[in-house]
Image: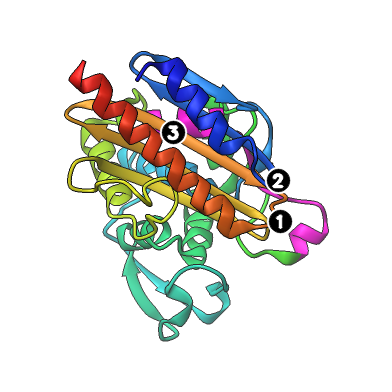
Amino acid sequence: MTLDELKNRVNGIIDPLNGEFAYYIETEEGYIGKNEEKVFPAASLIKLPILIEAFRQKEAGLLDLSVPVHINQKDKVGGAGVMNHLSPGASLTVLDVLTLMITVSDNTGANVMIEHAGRERINALLTELQCDQTVLERKLMDFKAIEAGKNNYTSAKDVVLLLKEIHHGKLLQNESRKMMLDILRNQQFRHKLPGSMDEEAVIIANKTGELQGTEHDAAIFEYNGRIIFAVVLTKNLTREADARHKLAAVGTAIQDYLISVQKN
């Protein structure tokens, strides 16, 4: 399968989507995309720059990942995650909080890390990485901020930049990048882009995002040493389950491309 054939197949899957969409897929042969610089609500993809900034501060000696964090009742928010169900005063290390923030998309964990890492520093990281369409304006599940017009935004192209920084960027040392990749590879939500993939053949590291009418996924796929970065963003969906099905079909197309290129 050529890159043009992959593009045609992805477009055929995504174009009939019942809402707005963007995608950006970068391979060793080049890239394909549609609306890749269009701004979308970030949903839980905003947790990727939080993760990177936490590890940057760890390397700078500003944040100790082994330090215990006490989860107080005031810290807890609803939505995705498990930390809001823990006993008041429960203690986790910073690394544990980061792990839950990614692997089960824990919103309480994300808010705790925004407090520890600092919103300004996270946004400064995004500026440094030239993620020009991405901004962290509020904490997760902060409905007062939403009513005040604040939100978190990103684009498909920016999210690929974040994935590439995690995978092989120059900002962090190899040890930190490996730790972040391991966290993403332990992702528990594999029902979107990886939904129909052969997980024994393809190494998957991904992060999902959801809001009402929104289904995102961002992933790094590796097959026999070949790497693909893929992001699909959606909004204003009328049938979210249909969108999840289409994301899985895009993942299947990516897997077919990886295998066919390897054979050639």
Sequence-first tag of 2 and 3: 2
In the current view of this chain or complex, which residue is farthest to the bottom? 87
Residue 136 is at least partly visible in this image:
no
Magenta stretch encompasses residue 86: no
Predominant secondary structure, magenta span: helix
- Residue 237 is at least partly visible in this image: yes
Q: Nearer the viewer, mark 2 or mark 3?
A: 2
Tell me: residue 140, above or below residue 30. Answer: below
- Identify residue for label 3: 230
As helix, strand or loop, the secondary structure at mark 3 comes to strand
Residue flagged by tag 1: what amino acid is it? Thr
Residue name at image x 56 percent, y 32 percent:
12
Of circles 1 and 3, the one toward us is: 1
| Distance from Cα at disc 1 to Cα at disc 3 | 23 Å
Mark 2 and mark 1 lie on one chain; the one further toward the N terminus is 2
- Tell me the residue that label 2 is attached to: 19
Query: Residue at position x 31%, y 62% from top?
Result: 96
Q: Residue furthest right?
A: 148
Contact? badges 2 and 1 (CB < 8 Å): yes
Q: Amino acid at mark 2?
A: Gly
Mark positioned earlier in the residue sequence (1 or 3): 3
Q: CA distance from mark 2 to mark 3?
A: 19 Å
The residue sitting at 41% across, 34% down in the picture is 163
The magenta stretch is 144-164
Q: Give me the C-alpha separation between circle 2 and circle 1.
A: 7 Å
